[in-house]
Image (cartoon, grey):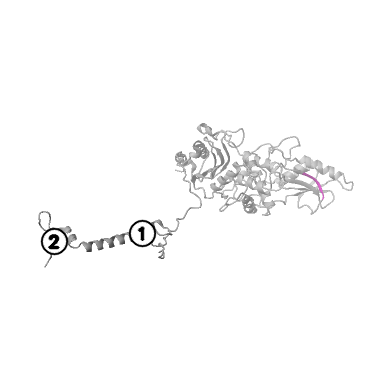
Amino acid sequence: MQTPGPATADGSPRGGIAAVFSRHRRAWLIAAGALVFVLLGSGAVFAGTQTGGSEPAAASAVSSSQAATPSPTPTVDPARPVPAEATTASRLRTCSVAGLAADTRLADFQAQVVNATTGEVLFDRGGTTSSRTASVMKVLTSAAALNVLGSDYRATTRVVKGAEPGQIVLVGGGDLTLSRLPTGQEPFYTGAAHLDDLATQTMVAWAADPANPPITSLVLDSSYFSGPDWDDGWARTELALGYMPEITALMVDGDRNEPTRSTSARSEDPIARAGAAFADALGGGLTISQATAPAGAAQLGAVQSAPVSTLIQQALIVSDNTIAEMLARLVAIKSGAGNSFAALQQGIVGGLAAYGIDTTGMIIKDGSGLSPNNAVSPAYLTALFVKVNAREGDLGVLFDGLPVAGGPRGSLSYSDRFAGANSAADGAVFAKTGWIDTGYTLAGVIHAADGTPLTFAIYAIGNVSSNAKIAIDTLATGFFNCGDNLSNN
């Protein structure tokens, strides 16, 4: 039997939650207290976990007579990896030369452009692929010579006593600029030594010893360079066209028929030509032969070439093949690689090592670039020209020898270079030209219109004609106009 619940104000029984609560008041109070306790405890644990504190939260404090319950140890997530250096986003560049680079006159096209201040590659088309350089090779030969020989090195031609009475030996020391013109008459090579000076020294020294009989025999020693005298990649027509002599350690005027001209036909025997000229300077009537000088023979006279610094500038400004081959061979000899064409790979590549640029894939067959079998990447050249532009070490010598677009002299001053609209880059492009039958090249430094120094290399390889030069100049002018805003797209 149920006990009736309390009545409402009108006397009716109470119902719902109120009635239940009224009938079981004590039980409700006990349950509510338990709920509050649970909630307070949970809140304390939650607060301790969230704060990660090592001390209990205030809500869970206990009396001093009880042991404190430690808060749970928080779990710390491993730190995210942080880059050693912050990555800087490249700026968006909007000056495109894509149309100029697509010119079909460029044939198998390769190029690279670098901001010489920041080292950032701005433009690249096959830049890491090694290809034929044409006469741009002279830049590498010059850089190797500056490192191995030094800017003050001079090649020496000597005369010593022969093994027989009345005999003297003319010993070639690799000076291919030695001139047969009389002293006071300037040959094509500025500052060249003269045979008549050497002849005078020889006769004075010979006459100083009364025991010497008259000079009757002249021996020619060209053993400082070994053969072959002609690279198998060179067209033999270059000899008659006047662009290249046979490479021997003894010759005069680069073996030119005309000693004062840049381009002049060369002979089939440069050693004999030098010997005949020296015999004439001694008064003539001598028996001439070829052999090696006796070891330790007394020296009668010596003359020296212009220094390497002068030779480099002459080799670069008009692209002189003779001096380039002279320097390449002297580098190989001085570095211990050997004295033949075969030694140039080791000699020149080794000579470039000091510049700290990767030479992987580089192939060196000659010092002038006439061989189509040379291979150097545009990327190597842009890296080297960064150092040339900064005039590191002796490399300022190389910069000073570069032809200048629109300049007063050199291979970029010709009427077919940087003409018309491309003259906008006159005075701002400092670069070495290159040309062989299967390629036109240009590489160097551009002082761009916005003031940015750029280093660049452009190769037009394969089935090319002379109008490739115009396409190359136009692209270089595009680089000049764009400057640091040059886009790779």
Pointer 1 residue: 44
Measured Cα–Cα span from mark 1 to mark 2: 41 Å
- Foreground residue among 127 and 258: 127
Q: In the orientation shown, which residue stands out farthest toward the right?
A: 210
Image quadrant holding the N terminus, namely bottom left
Mark 1: few, some, or many residues within 10 Å (few <14, many ≥20)? some
Residue 5, numbered label: 2
Q: Residue at x 54, y 46 (%)?
A: 378
- Foreground residue among 31 and 4: 4
Q: Earlier in the sequence, mark 1 or mark 2?
A: 2
Decide if residue 236 is in sight here: no
Q: Where in the figure is residue 376, as x and y percent of width and height?
A: 56, 49
Residue 259 sits in quarter: top right
Residue 41 in the figure: left or right of residue 122? left
Q: Amino acid at mark 1?
A: Ala
Q: Where in the figure is residue 419, as x and y percent of width and height?
A: 53, 33
Does dot 2 land on a helix, a strand or a loop?
loop
Decide if residue 18 is in sight here: yes
Q: Residue at x 48, y 52 (%)?
A: 83
Residue 191's place in the image compared with 20, above or below, is above
Image quadrant holding the C terminus, namely top left
Q: Where in the figure is residue 210, as x and y percent of width and height?
A: 89, 46
Q: Is residue 301 covered in magenta?
A: yes
Q: How many marks?
A: 2
Residue 57 in the figure: left or right of residue 221? left
Range of magenta residues: 298-302
- Foreground residue among 471 and 61: 61
Q: Is residue 69 covered in magenta?
A: no
Q: Where in the figure is residue 414, as x and y percent of width and height?
A: 58, 34
Q: Amino acid at mark 2?
A: Gly
